[in-house]
Image (spheres, helix red, strand yellow):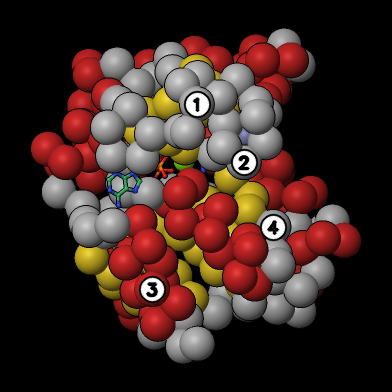
Amino acid sequence: MDFILLGPPGAGKGTQAKLMIDKWDIPQVSTGDILRAAVREGTPLGVEAKGFMDRGELVPDRVVIGIIAERLKEKDAAHGFILDGFPRTIPQAEALQEILDGLGRDIDHVISIEVDDEELVTRLTGRRMCKACGESFHVVFNPPVEEGVCDRCKGELYQRDDDREQTIRQRLSVYSEQTRPLIAYYEKQGKLRRIEGTGSIDNIFSRVVKAAGN
Ligand code: AP5
Ligand code: MG
Ligand code: ZN
């Protein structure tokens, strides 16, 4: 199964991806996680990406397309993958299609998770993320068993630099302008599955499974 998780910042893409990994035994490919790891390690990629990320803007298409072209060739993605946060622009979607054509495969389902803006701001301002595995928690809605520690891998939890209210608003407006057009793009291709993104995390996961047809 080849999936794209589409949705605004805070919609629950990362949260649902972790559940999908367990069900389908396929990797999550999150450009955000890959870029944050590069920033932390201070690699040339990280140095280039940091300013854009801190401002809540998109990193240039050329950069993220290169990441995905390499990542999807890896062995663990041979039987499927979950793209989380990619593509985010029409040129990225077109480049993805070329990459997949080259590999002789195609996207099965584009799952669009829909949540309104005020709920997104509340989710993101209370989010805590694991430094080691990228799992998302929320101080109120999804607290870890032990404060500051990841349930999944015992890694340290932190607050993302771009989870400040002003940057969140900027990310939401970038989503509306540059990423939302992908909904119509994939709808035209018959690949779009819309799901309501509010309710419990488990309920939303049931909708994901249903949207995937099993
Ligand atoms: P990225 O890391 O992809 O961030 P994003 O798209 O802004 O999405 P988030 O990770 O913030 O949200 P999410 O949907 O994963 O929500 P989560 O599950 O954590 O990108 C970051 C930056 O990197 C971009 O701004 C850009 O600069 C750059 N970048 C990345 N990809 C790029 C690309 N392709 N092109 C160009 N630039 C790129 O959940 C959020 C919170 O809600 C958590 O606290 C969670 O516990 C909670 N929650 C989850 N589900 C529920 C629920 N059902 N009820 C209540 N709370 C819930
Ligand atoms: Mg995420
Ligand atoms: Zn973890």
- The disc label shown at residue 27, or none: 4
Pair 4/2: label in front: 2
Q: Do tag 4 and tag 2 residues touch (Cβ < 8 Å)?
A: no
Q: Is mark 3 on a helix, strand or loop?
A: helix
Q: Position of residue 153 (x, y in %)?
A: 67, 36
The reply to whether residue 91 is visible in this rendering is: no
Specify the quadrant that holds the N terminus: bottom right
Disc 2 residue lies near ligand 3 with CB under 8 A = yes
Q: Earlier in the sequence, mark 4 or mark 3?
A: 4
Q: Which residue is tagged 2? A: 152
Q: In this view, does 177 lie to the left or right of 112?
A: left
Between marks 2 and 3, how big is the CA–CA gap? Answer: 21 Å
Above or below for 142 versus 36: below
Q: Residue 195 occupies which quadrant of the picture? A: bottom left
Amino acid type assigned to the residue bearing label 2 in the image = Arg
Q: Which of marks 4 and 2 is nearer the N terminus?
A: 4
Above or below for 187 versus 70: below
